[in-house]
Amino acid sequence: MIKGVYVQAKHLRSLYTFLNKMKDGEYEDKVNEYEDIQKEFGKIISLRDRLDRIDKARKKAKLSKSKVKELKKDIKGDLEKELNEVSG
């Protein structure tokens, strides 16, 4: 779902960027609006991806289970904060 919103915002930003160039800046607000959406959801996607990579990297990094649990807790806190900001 989140990835879909990010991708859709990217497509819309591209469309409005094109229209902005064609119509001498009439769509600049829309370009900025969808760029902001991309940034917000990009942070969330990045945090979610970090969570996915922790388990895979645990063995290579030789991290203890307690350290991994601590890292996940921190990332989940950051993720919850970002989701709350987006949902307003």
Image: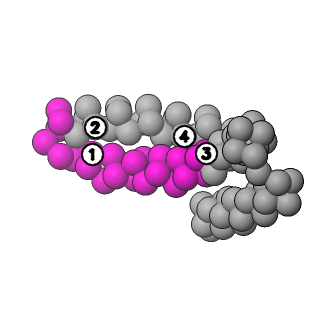
Q: Earlier in the sequence, mark 3 or mark 1?
A: 1
Say which of marks 3 and 2 sits in front. 3
Residue 2 found in image quarter = top right
Say which of marks 4 and 1 sits in front. 4
Residue at the farthest front position: 62
Q: Earlier in the sequence, mark 4 or mark 1?
A: 4
Mark 1: amino acid: Tyr
- Magenta residues (range): 21-46
CA gap, disc 1 to disc 2?
Answer: 7 Å
- Mark 4: give few (<14), some (14-19) or many (20+) Cα within 10 Å: many
Is residue 27 at all visible to an observer of this figure?
yes
- Looking at the rendered structure, the secondary structure element under dot 4 is helix
CA gap, disc 3 to disc 2?
Answer: 23 Å
In this figure, which residue is indicated by the disc labeled 1? 27
Dominant SS type (magenta): helix
Residue 45 as seen in the image, left or right of residue 62: left
**What residue lies at 17% left-to-right and 32% top-to-bottom?**
22
Mark 4: amino acid: Tyr
- Looking at the rendered structure, the secondary structure element under dot 3 is helix
Labels 4 and 2 touching (C-beta < 8 A): no
Q: Classify 49 as above or below 29.
A: above
Labels 1 and 2 touching (C-beta < 8 A): yes
Q: Classify 23 as above or below 83.
A: above
CA gap, disc 4 to disc 1?
Answer: 20 Å
In this figure, which residue is indicated by the disc labeled 3? 45
**Residue 9 coordinates in the image, percent (x, y):** 48, 40
Mark 2: amino acid: Thr
Q: Earlier in the sequence, mark 3 or mark 2?
A: 2
In this figure, which residue is indicated by the disc labeled 2? 17
